[in-house]
Image: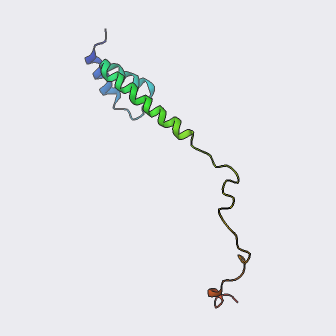
Amino acid sequence: MITTESNILLLKIISKFENMNDSILYNKLSVLPEELKSEVSEFIDTLLKKVKDSSEQKKPIFGSGKGMFVMHKDFDEPIEDFKDYIQ
């Protein structure tokens, strides 16, 4: 039978590795008491909501900026202040 102490020892060994994967997370979660597991579950729900919200950001609609910018008719004409530099 695996005890909590052996789980903690196992977690210390696993924590030496840099890559976090599902089994490592599961092992860490299995050591926690029930009340902390519910807190972890709530935190995961918060993270999932954040991911969902960021993926549902409004995408720009073609033509939505119409009328916001005006191109003057003399746009391509030389600027008076730069006449000395233009030959």
Q: Is residue 78 left or right of residue 35?
A: right
Name the quadrant of the C terminus: bottom right
Which x, y percent locates residue 1? Answer: 31, 8
Query: Which quadrant would residue 70 be assigned to in this image?
Result: bottom right
**Which residue is depicted at the point 32% across and 18% down?**
34
Q: Is residue 33 above or below residue 68?
A: above
In the drawing, does residue 8 fall left or right of residue 45? left
Q: Is residue 28 above or below residue 53?
A: above
Q: Residue furthest right?
A: 73
The percent position of residue 68, horizontal first and vertical second, equals 65, 62
Q: Depth check: give the residue in front, 59 or 2.
A: 59
- 70 left or right, relative to 55: right
Hey, which quadrant is residue 55 in on the image? top right
Question: Residue drawn at (66%, 83%), measured in percent from left and top?
Answer: 79
Measured from the top left, where is residue 83 in percent x and y? Answer: 66, 89
- 69, 19: nearer the viewer: 69
The image quarter in which residue 46 lies = top left
2 versus 10 height, above or below: above
How many discs mark residues in the rendered view? 0
Q: Measuring 36% from the left and 22% from the top, which residue is drawn there?
A: 38
Residue 5: x and y in percent read 25, 18
Asked if 62 appears above or below 30 in the picture, the reply is below
Which residue lies at the image location 70% right of the left edge and 54% below the top edge? Answer: 63
Say whether residue 80 is left or right of residue 48: right
Please identify the residue farthest to the left as the structure is shown.
5
Q: Residue furthest front?
A: 67
Colour mapping: rainbow
